[in-house]
Amino acid sequence: LSHVRHLFVTGLFVFACPTDGSAGSARVTQLELARTIDALAAIGPKPSGTDGARTAAAWLRNRFVEAGIADVHTETYRFPRDDVRSSSLAISGRAVAHDVLDGSGAGQATGRLVWVGQALDLRGIDLHGRIALVERHPLHHRSAQYARVAAAGAAAMIYVSSAPGDLRQVGSVRNGWEPMGTIPALTISGADGRWLHRALAVSELEARVRVEAVVTPATGANVVARIRGVGPGTVVVGAHYDSWFAGATDNGAGVAALVALASRRQGRSAPPVDLVFVGFDGEELALYGAYAFLRRHRGEDIRGVIDLETPAARGAALRGLAHSAGAMDAALRSAQLDRQYPGYLGVELVPRIFGGVIPTDVQGFYRLGFSVASTAVDAPYYHTSADTPDKVDLDRLADAVEGFDRAISDLVERGSGSSGAPWHIDAHTKEGEVVLTVRDERGTPQAGAMIDVSAFEGDFLLRGSRRAVTDPRGVAKVPVPSCQWMHVAASRDYPLAEAIVEP
Ligand SMILES: [Zn+2]
């Protein structure tokens, strides 16, 4: 006879008590969070520069004022809004339900439909005169897929959503702030895309695409609430409030956390540094709000930026928290946010995963050298009309508020850190030239860096752009263009540093 013992090991759950400035604050209630999420969702679609976004901005401004914050204001920016007037998609004569991806091109295209999968590698593939059927990748960004099929010669892109059923996932395909892309790009449902993929296996299909769009000058607005600190420096906490549809997980949940964090901070003693809570606009189109903020706050001693992007969704398989090393990493870990977000990774890895971009508001902050952190979970109803308040995981969102409250307390004490971006750009103007020097973290000049200088008027109206390559001393010079400001990017395979230059 033998005795068989089964050993059951149960998970050990550790609950930590706050030991810093958050002590004494009652836990944020789900009702408080739901109030923000419901109010923003009820407004409906809120793309930057529309009535929906203006209504949301006014609502958010009031919430900050109600919380008792004295310094609340909006900061506007102008940009070229891409308005679709009409569009059509027919495959072998049949109309297919679709949306036009923002920032794609206008025009007509007719050609054979070609399945290119996720379009991760199209080297050696000629798509001239063809229309590319591209499958959404869970991480790799649609703008990188778009750039690749356009470079391979495709006349248009049809993007197959991965959301359930007949839902279509919209979004922008911009890499920069060009008013319109080179080719039309339309999104269709996963159900239609799978049907087309199967049909292509047995016969050729002809696609006919037509997009009529106009570029209209528009104005966006960041909502900024500042709590004065006793010493110099600023910590920025942000969340974008613009959204494609109701946008409950992306990004009503982020704004709910932002409002909750600002409200409880207002009730405490003055922090060591300024705390700036920002509702960013224009994230969905082209990260306009974050870059407008960077321009306006040039020279401000920003010690760290925490961005609350899609922080909690029901059914999320991946819960990510990308962050700079050093002070930011230490602050997040001290608040155990690395446990709340098991996809806890260095922000420098994000462009490698997403195709060269950091597809949210921290991108510019990181590339300009500021210490950053951003959440992002994979919401199943991401960018669809079904991203409604019931899709938000309020339990986890409340946990996130507690965690970030502790992290902010730690960060304001800990001081500055660098972003960890591999390069930085030193920029100045001299004798009619912009002199740009690219160095790595150790200060070593970078020869052969590709430099793109884009000149803007009216905030985001592209006036022209130039490309240069750094010499052996890591220096590139271009004539100062006539413009309001210049955006500079230094790239190897993708941008590793950026600079903002005002002549
Ligand atoms: Zn978002």
Image (spheres, rainbow, N blue to C red):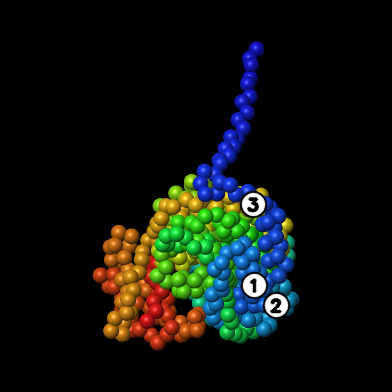
Q: Which residue is mark 3?
A: 28
Crowd around label 3: few <14 · some 14–19 · many ≥20 (10 Å)? some
Of callouts 1 and 2, the N-terminal one: 1
In this view of the protein, can residue 173 be seen by the observer?
Answer: no
Question: Which corner quadrant of the image does residue 268 belong to?
Answer: bottom right
When asked about the image quadrant of residue 10, the answer is top right
Q: Nearer the viewer, residue 240 or 257?
A: 257
Residue at screen point 31% across, 85% down: 432
451 sits left or right of 269 in the view: left
Counting from the top left corner in percent of width and height, residue 405 is at: 55, 52
Q: Amino acid at mark 3?
A: Val
- First of labels 1, 3 by sequence position: 3
Residue 407 picture location, percent across and down: 51, 51
Question: Residue 264, how many percent across, how many down?
Answer: 59, 55
Distance (Cα) linking label 1 and label 3: 23 Å
Instruction: Compare residues 25 and 3 and report the one nearer the observer.
Output: 25
